[in-house]
Image (cartoon, rainbow, N blue to C red):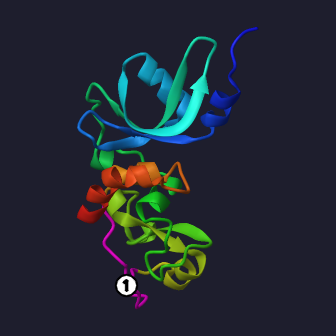
Amino acid sequence: MGCSYSLCYDADVRRVLVLNATYEPLNVCSSRRALVLLLKRKAEAIDLSERLCRSEHECHRVPHVIKLREYVHVPRGPARRISRRAVFARDRFRCQYCGADKRLTVDHVLPRSKGGTDTWENVVASCAPCNLKKGDRTPAGADMRLARPPRAPDPTCFVYMYVDDIHDSWLPYLEPATAAG
């Protein structure tokens, strides 16, 4: 009587890494969305899990990684939207002054009161105590140092935005971009 979607529903909470046609990480989607892209032949499976998604007539292995068949243009640099979560992901959810991973805020390296703007090169993740200590000064004026200069994020940043745990099968596609940054 109808389809058996119990395993497919369970798989829907799993996340799948989506690669551009050039193998560049684009984002993360649900297993269900990944299966739809595979069935529509808009993507191909790169790494499959042992988990199964069954319907009345078919059975499919749930992918860990898929690659789009056609290249998708992705805006870079300033064209990428800045959000708190994107800044935190770019900075790997760590304060750029002390390395803490709790009570994160966004800090303007050059304060807005001194002409600082909302650009990738002027915002960093900062824990609340470091942000309070820095106040309305530059890092040098507060005798603080940044772990690294802020810059527009690489594509892996947007993968880290959507997941807490990175599956081992994703690492070959994320590590080259991470090593370059």
130 versus 25 height, above or below: below
Q: Is residue 89 above or below residue 63?
A: below
Residue in the image at 27% along x and 25% along y: 70
Q: Answer yes or no: is residue 153 visible.
A: no
**Residue 103: x %, y % from top left:** 62, 71
Name of the residue lying farthest toward the right: 1
| In the rendered image, the vertical position of residue 103 relative to residue 60, given as above or below | below
Q: Which residue is mark 1?
A: 145
Number of numbered discs overlaid on the protein picture? 1
Question: Residue extending furthest top?
Answer: 1
What SS does tag 1 mark?
loop
- Give the position of the C terminus as an image quadrant: bottom left
Amino acid type shown at disc 1: Arg
Query: Magenta part mainly helix, strand or loop?
Result: loop
Span highlighted in magenta in the image: 138-151
Q: How far across and down, in percent of the image, does residue 129 sit? A: 59, 81
Foreground of the two, 17 or 155: 17
Question: Residue 148 colored magenta?
Answer: yes
Residue 26 in picture, x, y percent from top left: 37, 41
Position in image of residue 162 (x %, y %) = 52, 48
- Looking at the rendered image, the quarter that the N terminus falls into is top right
Left or right, 131 with reference to 96: right
Q: Is residue 35 left or right of residue 10?
A: left
In depth, the one of 152 and 154 nearer the eye is 154
Q: Quadrant of residue 171?
A: bottom left
In reply to whether residue 125 is colored magenta, the answer given is no
Q: Residue at x 33, y 67 (%)?
A: 150
Q: Can residue 56 be seen in this snapshot?
A: yes
The answer to which of 136 and 58 lies nearer the viewer is: 58
Q: Nearer the viewer, residue 70 or 107?
A: 70
Horizontally, residue 105 falls left or right of residue 18, namely: right
